[in-house]
Each structure stands twice: as C-alpha cells, then as structure tokens.
Amino acid sequence: MIVASIIIGILLLFLLIIWFTTLTIFIDYSHRMDDDHLRVHFIIWKFIRYKLKIPTIKVEKDEPTITYEKKTNTGTHTHSEITTKEITERISDFKELLEHIFGLKIIIRKFLKKVRITQLEWHSTIGLKDAALTGKLTGTAMALKSIIIAFISKKMNLMQFPSYSVTPSFQIPISETALKCMIKIRIGNAIVAGLKIVKFWRGGKGSFKTKPLTMISKEDSNESL
C-alpha cells in the first residue's frame, strides 16, 4: 500500500511538472531568389531538443510539382514531391477544416492569448528592374508586414517589440527575406485546448482527401458503421 502510494505520488508529481513545462519553438526561415531554407527547433527543459530542417524547397520548371527535402536531427533525409492535384485537394481540405473550426474560435482565441512570442525578426529585400515599381512594391510589402504583425500582437502575447523591415534594391533585381521567431507554449495550456477541441469536434467530422486529415474521415466512417 505504501509502495503504491509512493508510485502514485511520483506519477502525479511528474504530470504536474509536465503540465507547467514550457515548450519553446524556434523558427528560422530564409528565402533568396529560388532558394528556400526552413529550420524548426523544439526545446523542452533546454536539454531536450528536436531539430527539423527543410534545406531545399523549389518549384520544378518542367512540370507543375514542388520538390522538397527534409532532414531531422537523426540525420535521415526524405525526398517528396507535391503535384498540382495534391495542392488543390489540400486547399479544399483546408477550406473544409476552416468551416469545422469556425465554431472553435473562442477556444483557439483563448489558447493563442496564452502563447508567448519572445522573438520576432522579419527582414526583406526587394528589387525589380523598374525603380518606380520597386518603390511601390516596397511600400506595399511594408504595409502588409505591419498588418500581419499587428494581427499577431492582437491575438498573441508579444513579449518584445518585433523587428521588421523591407529594403528596396534599385540596382539589382532581387528577392530575399529572413524570418526568425521564438514561440513559447505551456504544455498544460496546449493539453486543455486539445481536450476542448476534441470534445467540440465530436459533433461532426469532415470528408477530407489528404493525409493526415483522411484519418479523421476514416474514423467517422467506422463509427457510423
């Protein structure tokens, strides 16, 4: 009986620690002409780390497909292609998903308010052959960035003022951008939001065509049988 109580106490203590543990997500994205790189780091307790790298993202010129390579912290590489049909199906699934989660906006809004953004840097350089068009495009891009950052600051907690800019290049046609963002999420808040979403989702599931959303449709079909 004493041993069982000790084990239960240890489990409860472990769950309590997990509940208040913060997950840190660091996003590092860079774009230079046709070259894109994306790196995502997941950090817990500073020493538990998982790295996800997508070093190559390119659009094939011969056929309408997007090719990308993915590298994880285990050193494994995966090579994948996305066709135009898959892109269309993903857009269709996304629209249907938005319709399903429209009723979840209160849950999501409360969760996002507890998400902290401790770093946000977004700098771009734009240049066209026409100087006048470069100036107009620079102003439009800067306005768009301001709107996006204002939206983020309204929905989430920006812990420090973001650094962002758009630099015009009147001499050389160029397209560059660099984005660095650090997000902190308390695991307990994510668990609560997840449970609320699952409870709400039971009211109806969509008919999705792409993975992993197709698993939801399959579960719904099995339940109806």
Image (tube, rainbow, N blue to C red):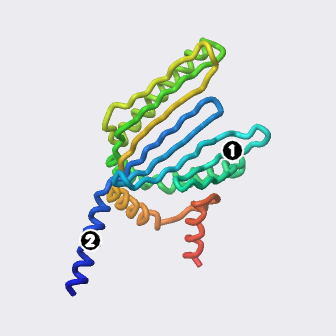
- Left or right, residue 106 beside residue 59: left
Give the numbered dot on residue 183. Answer: none
Residue 31 drawn above or below residue 77: above
Q: Position of residue 2 (x, y in %)?
A: 20, 84
Q: In this view, does 3 lie above or below 116?
A: below
Task: Name the N-terminal-most of marks 2 and 1.
Answer: 2
Label 1: which secondary element? strand
| Quadrant housing the C terminus | bottom right
Name the residue rendered at 48%, 27% in the picture: 123
Where is residue 127 drawn, in percent x and y?
A: 60, 19
Identify residue type, mark 1. Ile
Towards the viewer: 85 or 3: 3
Q: Which residue is drawn at 65% across and 46% down?
A: 68
Say what amino acid the circle numbered 2 marks.
Answer: Leu
User: Residue 163 in the image: x percent, y percent?
Assistant: 40, 28
Query: What residue did someone put label 1 on?
Result: 66
Q: Name the residue that disc number 2 marks.
A: 12
